[in-house]
């Protein structure tokens, strides 16, 4: 899942970022409210974790702007403010959850998982693709021969291609979705993941095609 983290406390942000990356998420970190608002308006995300007290724009303003644009991205607000009126203001602005500092990473991770499941449930329960059944909420793939075990990156790649079913997805978009915008990664990382995923999907009726110079697309048509 691609997560945007907006937090101006660098040590805290780095700790959250490292923990989420260890769980297989792509994380984009921004420390300025106005920059985060612009980033979310153009690049989007699967989920946003936003501090309330930020330079230029507050977390409340970021959430209000998101909802005004019609975005349904789940948002967790982080703040040192524990007053009821502040929690109410954050939820009324359009936040989905509210976590008061200091907190344990285990709790933040649990809330991320809960919002991820809720978003998956809204999109779909179990999808049939070729001979595969994919349970979005459980993130489980089942083929006629049994479960297809995918590491986190390959599973994220599968979801990215599935979300663009039958359409070309650029290598740059895939890299951003898996590793975060501007992440430091080897040039062939996406190709290696594509190759591994292709092998595991072999014989399932699901094909990953290469559009030379453009990117990749997934469909259920034979090569």
Image: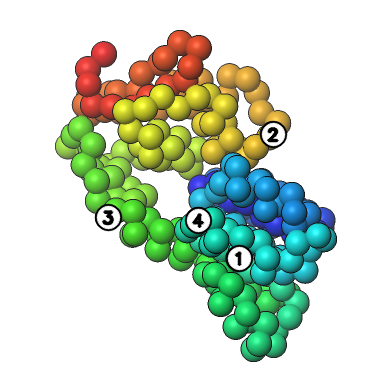
In-front residue for pair 129/77 = 77
Q: Give yes or no for contact between labels 4 and 3 (Cβ–Cβ under 8 Å).
A: no
Q: CA distance from mark 2 to mark 1?
A: 26 Å
Give the residue pinned by disc 2: 182
Give the residue pinned by disc 3: 125
SS at mark 2 in the image: loop
Q: CA distance from mark 4 to mark 3?
A: 21 Å
Would you place residue 193 above or below residue 145 in this image? above
Residue visible at 29% across and 23% down in the picture: 207
Give the residue pinned by disc 4: 71
Expressed as whole percent of the image width and height from the top left, the position of residue 164 reads 38, 34
Residue farthest toward the top in the current orientation of the protein: 212
Mark 3 surroundings within 10 Å by alpha-carbon count, few (fewer than 14), some (14 through 19), many (20 or more): few
Please tell me in which quadrant of the rendered image residue 60 appears.
bottom right
SS at mark 3 in the image: loop
Please tell me in which quadrant of the rendered image residue 165 appears.
top left
Q: Give yes or no for contact between labels 1 and 3 (Cβ–Cβ under 8 Å).
A: no
């Amino acid at each position: 899942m691609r997560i945007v983290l907006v937090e101006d406390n660098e040590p805290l942000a780095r700790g959250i970022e490292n923990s989420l990356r260890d769980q297989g998420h792509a994380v984009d970190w921004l420390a300025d409210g106005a920059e985060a608002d612009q980033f979310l308006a153009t690049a989007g995300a699967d989920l946003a974790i936003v501090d309330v007290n930020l330079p230029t724009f507050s977390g409340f303003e970021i959430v209000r702007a998101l909802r005004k644009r019609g975005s349904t991205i789940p948002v967790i607000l982080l703040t040192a403010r524990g007053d009821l009126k502040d929690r109410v203001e954050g939820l009324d602005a359009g936040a989905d959850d509210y976590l008061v500092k200091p907190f344990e990473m285990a709790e933040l991770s649990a809330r991320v998982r809960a919002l991820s499941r809720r978003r998956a449930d809204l999109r779909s329960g179990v999808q049939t693709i070729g001979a595969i059944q994919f349970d979005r909420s459980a993130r489980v793939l089942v083929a006629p021969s049994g479960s297809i075990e995918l590491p986190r990156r390959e599973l994220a790649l599968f979801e990215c291609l599935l979300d663009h079913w039958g359409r070309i997805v650029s290598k740059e978009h895939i890299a951003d979705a898996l590793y975060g915008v501007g992440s430091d990664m080897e040039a062939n990382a996406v190709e290696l993941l594509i190759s591994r995923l292709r092998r595991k999907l072999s014989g399932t009726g699901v094909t990953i095609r290469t559009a030379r110079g453009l990117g990749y697309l997934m469909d259920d048509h034979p090569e």
